[in-house]
Amino acid sequence: MANLELYELKGCPYCAKVKNKLDELNLEYDSHEVPRSHGDRTEVKEVSGQTGVPVLVDRDHGVDGMAESDDIVQYLEETYGQGASA
């Protein structure tokens, strides 16, 4: 099991943006596809406190439910990409 988990919705452009960054950085992650209806997204609500996607969980770095694609992409770049400190 990967230490990164992504909650996503098929066809979501914001989710695709995060997946592209994960792929660019060659990061392994577990994908959790959520239901289309916000009312049925109980799992992602438990993780992040809200029903929007994408949501990233990074157990190695204590990230329990980061939302907002721009924030996730920036986090991934700073933590795992060129911006990561040695």
Image (tube, rainbow, N blue to C red):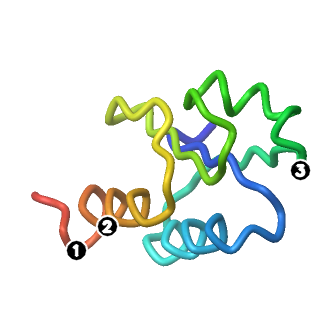
Foreground mark, 3 or 1, reads 3
**Above or below, comparing residue 2 to residue 42 in the picture:** below
Quadrant holding the C terminus: bottom left
Q: Image quadrant of residue 25? A: bottom left
Do the residues under discs 1 and 2 have CB atoms within 8 angstroms? yes
Residue at x 61%, y 34% (from the top left corner): 50
How packed mark 3 is, by other alpha carbons closer than 10 Å (few <14, some 14-19, many 20 or more), is few
How packed mark 2 is, by other alpha carbons closer than 10 Å (few <14, some 14-19, many 20 or more), is some
Mark seen at residue 24: none
Residue at x 65%, y 51% (from the top left corner): 53
- For marks 3 and 1, give the CA distance: 34 Å
Q: Position of residue 21 (x, y in %)?
A: 49, 72
Where does label 3 land, which residue? Answer: 36
Residue at x 19%, y 62% (from the top left corner): 84
- For marks 1 and 2, give the CA distance: 6 Å
Q: Nearer the viewer, residue 49 or 43?
A: 49
**Above or below, comparing residue 78 to residue 57 in the picture:** below
Where does label 1 land, which residue? Answer: 82
Q: Earlier in the sequence, mark 1 or mark 2?
A: 2
Amino acid at the residue labelled 3: Arg
Amino acid at the residue labelled 2: Glu
- For marks 2 and 3, give the CA distance: 28 Å
Where does label 2 land, which residue? Answer: 77
SS for callout 1? loop
Q: Image quadrant of residue 48? A: top right
Residue at x 55%, y 66% (from the top left corner): 18
Q: Earlier in the sequence, mark 3 or mark 1?
A: 3
Foreground mark, 1 or 2, reads 2
Q: Nearer the viewer, residue 53 or 21?
A: 53
Quadrant holding the N terminus: top right
